[in-house]
Image (cartoon, rainbow, N blue to C red):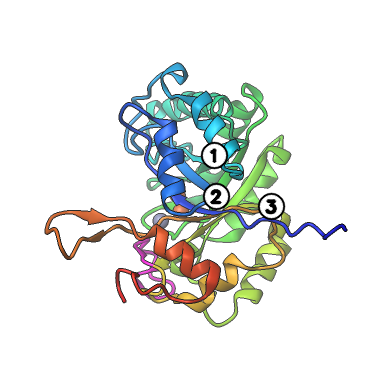
Amino acid sequence: MNTPDIPVLPIGSHVSMSGKEMMLGSVKEALSYGANTFMLYTGAPQNTRRRALSELHIEEAQALMKARGMQPFVVHAPYIINLANTVNQETYRLAVEFLTQELIRTKGMGSQVLILHPGAHVGAGMKAGIDSIAKGLNEVLAASPDVLIALETMSGKGSEIGSRFEELAAIYDRVQKPERLRVCFDTCHVHDAGYDIVHDPEAVLERFHRLIGREQIAVFHINDSKNEKGAAKDRHADIGEGRIGFETLYHFVHHPDFPGIPRILETPWYPDPENPGRMLPPYKEEIQWLLTASRPKTFPHA
Ligand code: FE
Ligand code: FE
Ligand code: ZN
């Protein structure tokens, strides 16, 4: 008898890639959280030092993913990439060159999606920043493999670009290959940017749809927020511990319009009550909670 295929809900968290095992360790970390997907940085998010693909244990990592029936994973570009910087041309050049390398690494690791913070205009103004991002993306996309770049919705901290959906739409409009672009929808950032996802998530998604199209969302970052709506702060809170709350985050995780789209947690580690000075990841309990709607007894903040 045939049963209709129930699409798998890909859910996981940011994991690290370090030590001897590199990407193999990332997959093991994700599995330890009960996750079926994950997100990694190709190295420290704050710098551009990167190890060669041949040192990352990619084949073993992929074999383990396959054996455990895992879903595709995603890669996040480092924060220091700023395509919007028109003030310092060196920063812009470095961003173009490094982003090109990141797309090659993403493909080499076996992922189709590289998440990118659009950039910050550092005083030159929104228009100059957006033009610069589009120019940079055009350079990068012309010269690199067919990996998608998912522009992340930002909180609007400082001179960040991409906190208004209109700004992301303007980047799409100016890019020669918009088919290579996608969006990473971060719940904390969208809330901090001033959109009321708590009281009317559907109105926010509808607004996004009119400007960009909901089929453009390739990744969700599922984070609670330490700040009130519109704070433009970008401080993530653990699930159910912030101003967004469990109900809204559960709504985004189980939203029927986004089957097969990875939901990635970037919630903060918390201090181990039994070992002062040690930090623990909340992901195992948060994934379980978000999947079952019942709060695990072992949840750190219970
Ligand atoms: Fe991000
Ligand atoms: Fe994020
Ligand atoms: Zn953030």
Disc 3 secondary structure class: helix
Quarter of the image where the C terminus is located: bottom left
Quarter of the image where the N terminus is located: bottom right
Give the residues drawn in magenta, as a range.
225-238
**Label 1 crowd bin: few (<14), some (14–19), many (20+), radius 10 Å:** many
- Can see residue 196? no
Closer-to-camera residue (214/175): 214
Which residue is situated farthest in the right direction here? 1
Closer-to-camera residue (89/2): 2
Mark 2 touching mark 3, by CB under 8 A? no
Question: Residue 36's mark?
Answer: 2
Disc 1 secondary structure class: helix
Disc 2 secondary structure class: loop
Residue pointed to by mark 3: 216
Q: From the image, give the main secondary structure of the stretch colored magenta.
A: loop
Quadrant location of residue 142? Answer: top right
User: Which amino acid type is shown beneath numbered disc 3?
Assistant: Gln
Residue pointed to by mark 1: 133
Which residue lies at the image location 58% right of the left edge and 68% below the top edge?
A: 252
Which residue lies at the image location 33% right of the left edge and 35% below the top edge?
A: 44
Indicate which disc, 1 or 3, sits on the residue closer to the N terminus: 1
Tell me if 176 is positioned left or right of 66 in this view.
Answer: right
Which residue is situated farthest in the bottom direction here? 199
**Horizontal and vertical percent for residue 114?**
55, 38
**Horizontal and vertical percent for residue 185?**
56, 57
User: Which amino acid type is shown beneath numbered disc 2?
Assistant: Asn
Relative to residue 98, is residue 44 depicted above or below? below
Q: Is mark 3 within 8 Å of ligand 2?
A: no
User: Which amino acid type is shown beneath numbered disc 1?
Assistant: Ile
The Cα atoms of the two marked residues, 1 and 3, are separated by 18 Å
